[in-house]
């Protein structure tokens, strides 16, 4: 499978009232890395003719991240069927290796003009599921 990684540093704006990363920020990071992965790997023609929307998020919060923590995010697609793909995002403290968040999101592929669901093509599956 094609694993995509990204690193970020927790800043003050990421924190909630408990001085931990706010759960809303984790969701934003999940969406950001999914978008970055798509843009880094998909051909321009696909990027220009399709759009992804979220159907569901399932998020497990394991540990809290704090100010200045270095977070490693990684994402990959586990499977796809019809217009839906299952994307996993894991966030870990890069210095300790401690898992912070694990999320499973169902994304639906849409035609960018009609906004109707599109079957995930073999081309997309080969890029995001089959290739290392």
Image (cartoon, rainbow, N blue to C red):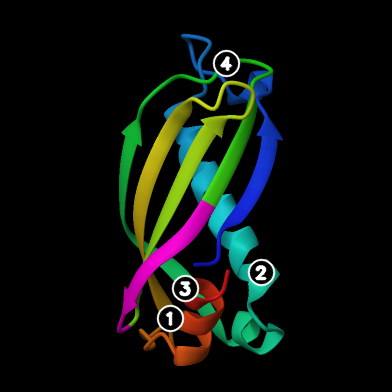
Mark 3: give few (<14), some (14-19) or many (20+) Cα within 10 Å. Answer: some
Task: Tell me where residue 81 appears, x and y as whole percent.
Answer: 29, 80
Considering only order in the chain, which callout, 2 or 4, is on the residue closer to the N terminus?
2
SS of the residue under disc 4: loop
Considering only order in the chain, which callout, 3 or 4, is on the residue closer to the N terminus?
4
Are the residues flagged by discs 4 and 3 in contact, CB closer than 8 Å? Answer: no
87 relative to 10, above or below: below
Task: Tell me where residue 106 appears, x and y as whole percent.
Answer: 33, 62
CA–CA distance in space, label 3 to label 1:
19 Å
Residue at which label 1 appears: 110
Q: Which mark is residue 56?
A: none
- Mark nearest the camera among 3 and 1 is 3
Residue at which label 4 appears: 66
SS of the residue under disc 3: helix
Q: Which residues are magenta?
A: 75-82
CA–CA distance in space, label 4 to label 2:
29 Å
Q: Which mark is residue 129?
A: 3
CA–CA distance in space, label 1 to label 4:
36 Å
């Amino acid at each position: 499978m094609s694993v995509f990684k990204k690193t970020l540093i927790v800043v003050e704006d990421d924190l909630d009232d408990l001085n931990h990363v706010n759960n809303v920020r984790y969701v934003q990071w999940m969406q950001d890395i999914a978008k970055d992965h798509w843009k880094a790997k998909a051909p321009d023609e696909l990027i220009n003719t399709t759009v992804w929307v979220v159907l569901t998020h399932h998020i497990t919060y394991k540990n809290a991240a704090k100010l200045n923590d270095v977070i490693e995010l990684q994402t990959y697609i586990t499977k796809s069927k019809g217009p839906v793909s299952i994307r996993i995002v894991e966030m870990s403290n890069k210095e300790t290796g401690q898992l912070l968040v694990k999320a499973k999101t169902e994304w639906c592929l849409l035609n960018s003009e009609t906004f109707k669901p599109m079957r995930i093509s073999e081309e997309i599956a080969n890029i995001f599921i089959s290739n290392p």
